[in-house]
Image (cartoon, rainbow, N blue to C red):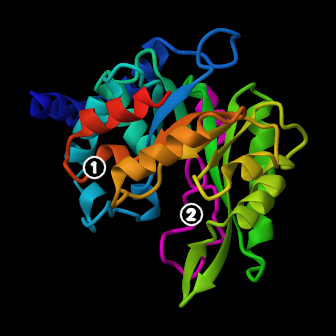
Amino acid sequence: MFAERLAAVIDARVHRPRAIAEAAAARHRALLFTGGGHDRLVLVAADHPARGSLGAGRRPTAMADRADLLERLCVALARPGVDGVLGTADVLEDLLLLGALDGKVVVGSMNRGGLSGSAFEIDDRFTGYGAEAIAAAGFDGGKMLLRIDPDDAATVSTMEACARAVDALAGRRLMAMVEPFVSRRVDGRSTNELTPDAMVRAISVASGLGGTSAYTWLKVPVVDDMERVMAASTLPALLLGGEVPADRDAAFEGWQKALRLPTVKGIVAGRSLLYPADDDVAGAVDTAVSLL
């Protein structure tokens, strides 16, 4: 049955590209910032392929099969308690045509130019959604990655672009989801520092981006001493799911502890939910939802 639905998506892309805008206009929205609901969020992330990051766990090309990825996303989005999705335009438009975004929170991924493993990874340019396109599609916010490498001068241009994006989203009353890290080159590859001190610094910088932080949320990994880390800002935060964990129970326990902190308002997880070691997407999603 999914193959038939996917065939209809491909047919629409070939013969009726306007169907994407029509589906966006007809979609029932689940608005944020309305004073009711969505005080806790579970979002599924699917913006990895646009950075050339296709691996999940021990599968180096897990996300390379678009039909398989879309089917996993549809399974995840249909589970009770899943509020929405984060993705690039190609993925979100496929989901629109599949009818999977009705009533969901939708966040567009903005800067995908820092391709995984590239020499220019820190110069993470905005090659995905802009605030105008997010608003035109009727989506709820935009997500940006901010890697702060003190040894790479390209960091400041990415910071400036993120600040402009925060302002552009806030001007439209849309969520600006900032995912900050302190990063360094190790053996030629950009590596995030997942220590409490590094995350405190990254959060402190990210919180001050733009002319207002009224609509800014943070997307942060679970690290040691999360109470001290999250004390660095009053901004609401969502936990980053990250890579497929070797010990899923331990990873979920870490999420559960962090979710008790006052500013932590939910989870954004991609590969850890879409490609669990046992391939039970529904089971992984249900477990994550139960933590809330």
Q: CA distance from mark 1 to mark 2?
A: 27 Å
Horizontal side, residue 81 vs residue 214: left or right = left
> Which circle, 1 or 2, is nearer the viewer?
1
**Foreground residue among 243 and 133:** 243
Q: Is residue 222 above or below residue 25?
A: below
SS state under label 2: loop
The picture places residue 11, in percent across and down from the top left corner, at 20, 33
Horizontal side, residue 260 vs residue 2: left or right = right
The answer to whether mark 1 and mark 2 are in CB contact below 8 A is no
Q: Which residue is mark 1?
A: 276
- Judge the density around disc 2: few (<14), some (14-19), many (≥20) Cα neighbours within 10 Å: some
**Foreground residue among 266 and 185:** 266
State yes or no: residue 132 in magenta: yes
The picture places residue 34, in percent across and down from the top left corner, at 69, 11
N-term-proximal mark, 1 vs 2? 2
Chief secondary structure of the magenta portion: loop
Disc number placed over residue 113 in the picture, else none: 2
Horizontal side, residue 255 vs residue 17: left or right = right
**Residue found 55% across the figure and 88% down from its top:** 188
Q: Is residue 141 above or below residue 274?
A: above
- Quarter-of-image position of residue 239: top right
Identity of the amino acid at label 1?
Pro
Q: Is residue 193 above or below residue 185?
A: above
**Foreground residue among 280 and 62:** 280
Give the residue at the far top of this rendering: 36
The picture places residue 149, in percent across and down from the top left corner, at 72, 74
Identity of the amino acid at label 2?
Gly
Q: Which residues are magenta?
A: 109-135
